[in-house]
Each structure stands twice: as structure tokens, then as C-alpha cells.
Image (spheres, rainbow, N blue to C red):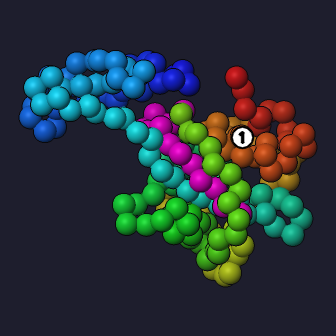
């Protein structure tokens, strides 16, 4: 996908207007291609989905990763994170996702980073990651995680599920990150 959203995928899968049922066409508005309903003159924006999660490190500087139980990319590793629910803030989402996936009760620290996630086949996402501290709970794989572990930079698995997570790991560990775990162009 181009930075200017110039491909048809970025316009979304819609074919018909959800308002009037008219067949959508592609037009150029705001210097971008957009899906448009000529019957009711409505533009359909295909916006990314917000997601949030946490960067948790232990006293040895290792980062907590979870192995994905389900597709997409089942078996690959990622930071504990997930899509925001309608009625929650990004911070509430991060706390919920940490608890669901790891069994830990955690608190929010500073914003670690914000990343564009464009390689998940379900949605483009905006991933907000927080530094998080552990308040309690029992470390266990749960929800959509099949396994979890703390990893030091040289031991981070090469099979990181999503580019945004790889970018965050590079931001966390810099040159210490194993080359196999770094984002590929």
C-alpha cells in the first residue's frame, strides 16, 4: 500500500452503500481514491482499527512475548496486544489484553510508541503500546495466546507475527535485537 492510500485495497471491500444499497464507484476526493455512492452522494472512508497493548520487561531487561494461538499467523510471537472495544480507552484496552493473554494484572506507564499495522489480513490498525508494570496475577497463557515467555534481545524469535511488533522490538532493543527478528522491507 502506498503512503497516500492509492490502491483499491485501502478503499475497503465495500461494493454497495449500506445507506441506500446503491452500487459504489471509485472517485477521487481529498486527493485520494475513495469509494462513493452516486445515489446518496456518500463517501465511504476505510479507516484503520485502533489496537493497544503493552511492553513488559522483567528485572533482567527481557521482554514478554506471547505465541499466537489462532490465525492470522498462528504460532508466531508478538507483544501482548489486541483490538480496542467500542466502550474502552486505549489504556483500558492494553490492561484488558495483558490480563486476557498473560494472566497478569498490570498498570499503564508511559506511551512506548504508536505504530501503523498494515500487514494483518483482518484490518489495517493503529497500534498504541504502553510501557506497563505488573501489579499481580499469575503468569499463564490465556485467551488467544498458546504460550508466553520473556526473551532477551539475542534470543527474540525470528517469527514475530506483525511488522509493527517487530518495529517496537527494534525501538526497545535497537542494535541488540537479533537480525532475524528485525523488520524486513
Whether residue 157 is visible here, answered yes or no, is yes
Whether residue 71 is visible here, answered yes or no, is no
Q: How many marks?
A: 1
Q: Quadrant of residue 134?
A: bottom right
Residue at 28% from the left image edge and 25% from the top image edge: 35
Residue at 51% from the left image edge and 52% from the top image edge: 51
Query: Magenta part of the protein: which range?
Result: 119-131
Residue at 77% from the left image edge and 57% from the top image edge: 63
Residue at 90% from the left image edge and 43% from the top image edge: 176
Specify whether residue 104 is painted magenta: no
Q: Is residue 185 above or below residue 68?
A: above
Q: Position of residue 153 (x, y in %)?
A: 86, 48
Left or right for 78, reference 61: left
Q: Position of residue 99 (x, y in %)?
A: 56, 70
Q: Please tell me which residue lies in front, 49 or 151.
A: 49
Q: Residues within 10 Å of mark 1 (few under 14, many from 20)?
A: some
**Which image quarter holds the C terminus?**
top right
Q: Mark 1 falls on what kind of element?
A: helix
Left or right for 64, reference 53: right
Specify whether residue 121 is painted magenta: yes
Q: Is residue 144 above or below residue 163?
A: below
Q: Position of residue 146 (x, y in %)?
A: 58, 55
Q: Which residue is mark 1?
A: 167
Q: Position of residue 103 (x, y in %)?
A: 59, 72
Amino acid at each position: 500500500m502506498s503512503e497516500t492510500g492509492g490502491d483499491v485495497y485501502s478503499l475497503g471491500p465495500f461494493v454497495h452503500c449500506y445507506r441506500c444499497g446503491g452500487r459504489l464507484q471509485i472517485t477521487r476526493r481529498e486527493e485520494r481514491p475513495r469509494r462513493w455512492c452516486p445515489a446518496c452522494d456518500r463517501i465511504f472512508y476505510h479507516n484503520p482499527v485502533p489496537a493497544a497493548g503493552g511492553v513488559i520487561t522483567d528485572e533482567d531487561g527481557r521482554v514478554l512475548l506471547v505465541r499466537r494461538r489462532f490465525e492470522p499467523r498462528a504460532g508466531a510471537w508478538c507483544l501482548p496486544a489486541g483490538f480496542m472495544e467500542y466502550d474502552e480507552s486505549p489504556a483500558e484496552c492494553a490492561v484488558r489484553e495483558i490480563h486476557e493473554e498473560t494472566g497478569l494484572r498490570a498498570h499503564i506507564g508511559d506511551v512506548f510508541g504508536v505504530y501503523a499495522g498494515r500487514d494483518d489480513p483482518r484490518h489495517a490498525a493503529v497500534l498504541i503500546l504502553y510501557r506497563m508494570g505488573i501489579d499481580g496475577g499469575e503468569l499463564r497463557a490465556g485467551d488467544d495466546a498458546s504460550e508466553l515467555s520473556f526473551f532477551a534481545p539475542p534470543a527474540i524469535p525470528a517469527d514475530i507475527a506483525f511488522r509493527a511488533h517487530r518495529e517496537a522490538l527494534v525501538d526497545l532493543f535497537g542494535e541488540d535485537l537479533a537480525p532475524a527478528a528485525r523488520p524486513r522491507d
